Amino acid sequence: MTDARLVQRAKGLLAVFNEAGVLEAADVHVAARLQKLSGENSENVLLAAAFAVRAVRMGSVCVEIERLREVSVDAAETDLDALPWPQAAELSAELRRSPLVLGRADSPLRPLRLVDTDDGELLYLDRYFRQEQTIRQVLDERSQRIPAFDDVALEAGLREFFVDAEDATRPSVAPDRQRIAAALAVAQWTTVIAGGPGTGKTHAVARILALLFAQHGPGLRVGLAAPTGKAAAQLEESVNAQAEVLGLPPGLTAMTLHRLLGWKPGSASRFRHGATNKLPYDVIVVDETSMVSLTMMCRLLEAVRPDARLLLVGDPDQLTSVDAGAVLADLVARPVAAVANPVFDQLVGADLAAADDPLEAALSPAERHRLAGGVVRLSRGRRFGGAIAELAVAIRQGREDAVLELLHSGVPEISFAAPDELDGLRTDLVDAAAAVTTAALDGDAIGALEAIKAHRLLCAHHDGPYGVTHWARQALDWVGAANGRPIDPTRWHAGQPLLVTANDHEARIYNGDTGVIVADGPDNLMAAFQRGQDAILLHPTRLPAFQTVYAMTIHKSQGSQYDTVSVLLPAEASALLTRELLYTAVTRARSHVRVIGTEESVLAGVRRQVLRASGLRRVFTN
Ligand SMILES: Nc1ncnc2c1ncn2[C@@H]1O[C@H](COP(=O)(O)OP(=O)(O)OP(=O)(O)O)[C@@H](O)[C@H]1O
């Protein structure tokens, strides 16, 4: 490993795990500091403390004492079996005696917390334990109460909004999980609406808002939010696009979660809204909840009034937030401890009892059980078809054979290319760039923005032979060669694809937005971004931070879809290559996905699940 990650003065186990590349300098420094402050000299305890810090850095909320060695590292660099792992029982006994661990009354410094659960012991940095406890307590408290509502009006609303595609006088065919989600959202305080892309989550949310307006009248205060500005803009757009048909008030606005909570840069309390100054809304909708970290979810739940409805919407199988926590996935999987609403079964009895329909399977007993906890998973793809959705489901379920079979099936929606078979990629890249440039030179902003969605190259890494930097340069060379003259990446040019990397609320440009440079008259260039059916134009010098994107990381592509997606897989040993990454990449494609890589890489991805340890899915026993 590189010198910057090595701690010269590290001793004992900390030094061994640091040298092996499992612990980084930051993990070791925190453990060493704790040793100094507490006098704790147990190497095992200090190693566990460093692992608790590492866990948060890697996105987990805590470490599982019995699964310490299931760390994710680049397998090519590290032989995990050769390391001196502590015995779990011995470590646990030492932690219980340690002055660093909360629970010992005589210790002034207790930054760690050891918790017994129904499935082994968890070690937390205490701060994250407390955040998780807040989430648990607020949700449990909310699930023990039931809102009052007009069931006759709700029944009428469900009949009005969930109708058969062919005959609007009839209810939609049961089971209809959107209808179930809508009934839940009115009948419970908290509802989790999970589902893959295009399963109609936003469609359901707009109808839920209409049902709630029917219940409470036009004075209903609605807070729409998402973790990123781009996701908030999309939510706002898609709710407003349906406002007229559904009779929603015009001009509902969405904002980032930070904004909703009243972010105060530089202040100690950080948010204006919290436990003592609750949010003023009667209903709060959070979209793209998979990207919400534990800390943000804690802040949100502290700030939601007990008598406000909360809808958490998102795809729990996608890549999670960069910060610690995978709260949405945890909420979908956690044990149910809730009071089921007796009226609910009557409202959607037909859906609950329905047998398999060709388009939507009957509810499983486990699903029915989760409904009591306010969790519903939409499963019927409403947007894209057959094979891509099948591939996504096979990846999600870890069915390796089915994944390979689909990749090799030769269906038009899926292609599988070896790492050196780049002709298809090159053709798609060059064709898409030509269409974008033609529209951009014509000053046709909408045409250029549409054309840019025809193809996208996605990589797992930033750097290295499988990274965005390398492939963006390659793409630029291909496009230049096809045009007969190289492109100068340092100069603005019509057809240049852009990715914004910072928010500018005034210009309505958000981190993650993609746009394109278009001609505006003979001598002028403008940057174009899509807003609904329209394009907004601004001078390129007014852009907040941006990159030119002939290739993009899979992380950055979250929340966007393209007609064709080419996914360039890294080597199988890459720790970044996970099931969630593969699922996220494949589900960005609307009509065609091209996977470029080896079978070994595909299988490594399907097998390696992001291990995001947390206590939310477990029952605490101490
Ligand atoms: N019940 C339905 N009847 C008819 N069309 C529907 C229905 N549900 C969804 N759709 C349509 O399917 C498409 C996808 O729906 P929607 O955007 O709500 O999905 P989503 O789950 O929010 O997708 P994403 O996660 O990609 O944003 C939309 O065009 C929507 O109008």
Image (cartoon, rainbow, N blue to C red):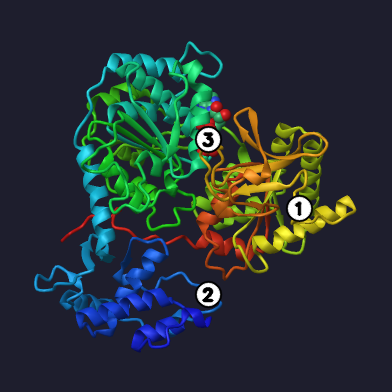
- The residue that disc 3 covers is 234
Q: Residue furthest top?
A: 169
* Amino acid bearing label 1: Arg
Question: On screen, 597 above or below 184?
Answer: below
* Percent coordinates x, y for residue 302 in the rendering: 26, 44
Query: Residue visible at 45% across and 20% down?
Result: 162
Query: Residue visible at 66% across and 46% down?
Result: 541
Mark earlier in primary sequence (3, 2): 2
- The residue that disc 2 covers is 75
The quadrant holding residue 487 is bottom right
* Percent coordinates x, y for residue 280 in the rendering: 29, 31
Determine contact: label 2, label 1, CB under 8 Å.
no
Determine contact: label 3, label 2, CB under 8 Å.
no
Question: On screen, 259 above or below 399?
Answer: above
The quadrant holding residue 312 is top left
Question: On screen, 233 above or below 5?
Answer: above
Look at the numbered disc 1 and give the secondary structure of its residue.
Answer: loop
Mark 1 CB within 8 Å of ligand 1: no
Query: Residue visible at 35% across and 73% down?
Result: 51
Query: Residue visible at 40% across and 20% down?
Result: 210
